[in-house]
Each structure stands twice: as structure tokens, then as C-alpha cells.
Amino acid sequence: MFRRREAVPFAFVAETDRFRSNVTPPPRERLSASQIVGRTLLGLTVVAGLAGSLIFGMPSLQSGDAATHQQQSEASDNR
């Protein structure tokens, strides 16, 4: 398909570079102390959960002598 080219006045193109809006966005609301404490506690809970899962999960990920050790039941000893 072909593009339709229209003449654009140079002054219009030049004005777009320095265009500023006269509408300012509303100021951001400040967080209250309880919101800051809540977000901090939530972050600490997530970090503690990840660290705990890593600490408790590491022994199950290690391969060592546990794989070569075989368990025998006491019922097979009396035969």
C-alpha cells in the first residue's frame, strides 16, 4: 500500500517540541504511618518466607550418604 503524504506546516512541527500542558496532575497523596508500617511488615513477611523455605529446603536438596543408606524394617530381622 502507498502512504498518503500531506503537507504539514513547518511551524506546527516546530511547536510540538516545546509544547507544555497547562494542566498539572494532582499532587500524590502522602502515605500514613500505618500504611508505611503495613507495607514494611508485608515486605518482611515475604522475605522471611523465602528465607525460611530456603533454609528448610536445603537439607532435602543435598545429596550425600542418605542415598546409599538403606532402611530395613524390623519385621524382616526375625526371619
Image (cartoon, grey):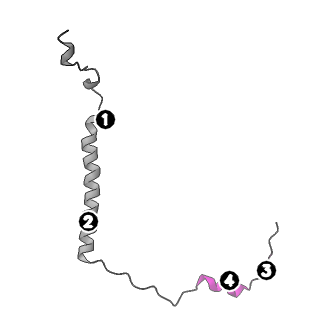
Residue that carries the numbered disc 2 in the rendered image = 40
**Mark 1 / mark 4, whichever is N-terminal:** 4
| Up/down of 74 relative to 37, above or below | above
Q: Residue at x 79, y 80 (%)?
A: 6
Q: Magenta segment, which residues?
A: 4-18
* 13 drawn magenta: yes
Q: Quadrant of the N terminus?
A: bottom right
Cα–Cα gap, marks 1 and 3: 67 Å
Pointers 4 and 3 in contact (C-beta within 8 Å): no
> Viewer-proximal residue, 49 or 73?
73
Residue that carries the numbered disc 1 in the rendered image = 61
Residue that carries the numbered disc 3 in the rendered image = 6
**Mark 4 / mark 2, whichever is N-terminal:** 4
| Up/down of 55 relative to 4, above or below | above
Residue that carries the numbered disc 4 in the rendered image = 13
Q: Is residue 40 left or right of residue 6?
A: left
Between marks 1 and 3 in the image, the one whose residue lies nearer the viewer: 1
Q: Percent x, y for residue 45?
A: 26, 58
Q: Amino acid at mark 2?
A: Thr
**Mark 2 / mark 1, whichever is N-terminal:** 2
Q: Residues within 10 Å of mark 2 (few under 14, many from 20)?
A: few
- Mark 1: which secondary structure? helix
Q: Residue at x 23, y 76 (%)?
A: 33
Q: Percent x, y for residue 43?
A: 28, 61
Q: Residues within 10 Å of mark 3 (few under 14, many from 20)?
A: few
Cα–Cα gap, marks 4 and 3: 13 Å
